[in-house]
Amino acid sequence: MGRLTEHVCSAGAAAAHAACERVPTACAAAAKHWASLHAWAAERTDQVNASAPWVLETAGDVAGAARVTASGAATAANAALEGWEQWEIAAAAAAVTLALAWLLSRVSAALRGSHGGMAQHVFAVLRSLPPLSWYIAKEKAKMRADLRGKRPGGGGCGGSEFSALPARGLSEEQALATVEARAADDLKFAEGQSPLSGAVYIGSDSHLALLNKVYEMYSVSNPLHADVWPSLRQMEAEVVSMTASMLGGGPGSGVCGAMTSGGTESILSAMKASRDYMQAVRGIRHPEMIMAVSAHAAYVKACEYFRIKAVVVKVDKDFRMTAAAVRARVNANTAIIVASAPGFPHGVMDHVADIAAVARRARVCLHVDACLGGFVLPFVRKLPGRTVPPFDFSVRGVTSMSVDTHKFGLAHKGTSVVLYSSSEIRKHQYTGIVDWSGGLYISPGMAGSRPGALVASAWASLVKNGVDGYVAQAERMMAVADRFRDGVSRMPLLAVLGRPEMCLVAFAATHPSKLNIYKVNDLLTQRGWHLNALQSPPALHFCFTGAHTLEVVDRLLDDLTEAVKEVSSNPNCVKGGSAPMYGMANVSPDRGLINEFLVTYQDVMLET
């Protein structure tokens, strides 16, 4: 050690000596440089002084021309307004000013409230102009009347029998009979025979009976009162812990979370917590969220709720978001990156590990949306011959996840789990109030009171299935999806989109100009099937669950073959349906106009 120190000191002394020897040389070079710079500045000063009279003369000419132009404009204006009364001139000026102010306010509002780019702002202003706005209002009124006559569940234009409280309450028998009569109109199907894409995930009648029994035991419970229902507190904590343990967050990992009412609330909770965390640790005041065009619609909702700017990137030819696409959009305001595992439209996973590396370097939050895949992908990975890229908390850089227990976790509808890599992020999901006259208050999420029965039945589903149950379910669903994918691949007019890691298959027409995929969907709907319509590109998908069997797949493939044949041979075989709306949505550049019609639809669905 002493010899090493001696060498270091000797080297330091030699370097210092050499530097001192170079000082005179460096000073001489600097003096020479400053002398040449002074000579250059003096030369430029002489040039400026010589040209100054010309500059002043030119400026005078410009000013004279401006006076002549102004004088001419004043003469033209006086001639145009000749014969006008003073009050008429004042009224016209006020009207023009108000019109310009109104137009400016509309443009400003559009710029503040839309993520659609400048074109959408322009369309918004045009739609607000009186002639066009009147026409749109007329068309929406027609649509509203048509929907009221066709909507499911009755009601019609005459209103509902129960649009107000009945003067005299029904008996228990009457109330039950009324519910049974209404339920008779709902879709019914035998175990394993669901015609629905997704929607119903429980394929076992006995499993559903178990959940219903547990629900009844806790039907009046509320997790808000942990002192009254301590068993609920324990079950909720265990649901979160069990979910985390299968996603790279076992004991000692620091991964924590909470239960929510569904995937959207899990997403909203994670976005709010991540936004506030990034403001606290990085001081980001104008947060931006980078997400793929295939990310779930709930992220757009989060941006609207929490004033986050959505930065939407395209996916690659396999419908996955890449790290390169994300890296190109990262800036000082980036607070959150969203990756999907998988994306809802096509069932394919974004490149989570590569995107996580970008998030780490940028020191931003990375949320992985596993609402659909959280209870499938970890178990598909255990199947022979199946590979699933890393996507959970085993990937360094993942800071939060959303996982739905009420989908492939086989729980009752109304439960999900949001997970965080640390409690430092999770605490920004909480709301604590210390100055309320009602007492001290703390809530872990958006809801105050919650149905404890759903917490209990979700717990029952997880412990009843266990790892072996979920692995068996994944094997059955993947076999069903493989059968369907292979069948679609053999149809010359259809093509499977992407290479899904999950039991979801998306497909499109190989030649959209020759086959309208939305008309195919309308024919399938007439045959009792319920597929999801996609756009950009126009496509359909079917999500296979525990409620589907190979027999269901074979029937679906037969009907799909017939529907494709019918539409390809007779493009006008379907009138109405969803094809016109989706067709317009795919070609109309005015996305706001499409949204106005969606709002009209939603208004009608919420009427009695």
Image: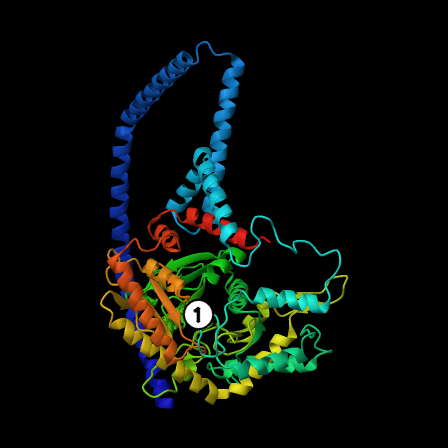
User: Going by the image, does 207 lie left or right of 474?
Assistant: right
> Which residue is at a point 27% across and 25% down the rendered structure image?
54
* Type of the residue with mark 1: Leu
Q: In the rendered image, which quarter is residue 229 located in?
A: bottom right
Judging depth in this view, the residue of 307 and 375 nearest the camera is: 375
> Which residue is at a point 32% across and 72% down the rendered structure image?
557
How are the residues colored? rainbow
> Which residue is at a point 39% across and 68% down the rendered structure image?
343
Q: Is residue 492 visible?
A: yes
Where residue 100 appears, as percent x and y from the top left, is 47, 31
Q: In the rendered image, which quarter is residue 546 located in?
A: bottom left
In this figure, what is the number of numbered marks?
A: 1
Where residue 55 appears, as percent x and y from the top left, is 29, 27
Q: Is residue 389 visible?
A: no
Where residue 484 appears, as percent x and y from the top left, is 32, 75
> Which residue is at a point 50% across and 71% down the rendered structure image?
188
Q: Which residue is mark 1?
A: 196
Disc 1: CA contacts within 10 A as few (<14), some (14-19) or many (>=20): many
Judging depth in this view, the residue of 495 and 573 nearest the camera is: 573
Question: In this view, which residue lies farthest toward the left?
Answer: 492
Name the quarter where the C terminus is drawn: bottom right
Name the quarter where the N terminus is drawn: bottom left
Q: Please tell me whether mark 1 sits on a helix, a strand or a loop.
A: loop
Where residue 323 appears, as percent x and y from the top left, is 34, 68
Question: In this view, which residue lies farthest toward the top?
Answer: 83
Location of residue 582 with respect to 434 vertically, above or below: above
Judging depth in this view, the residue of 570 and 223 nearest the camera is: 570
Judging depth in this view, the residue of 531 and 435 nearest the camera is: 531
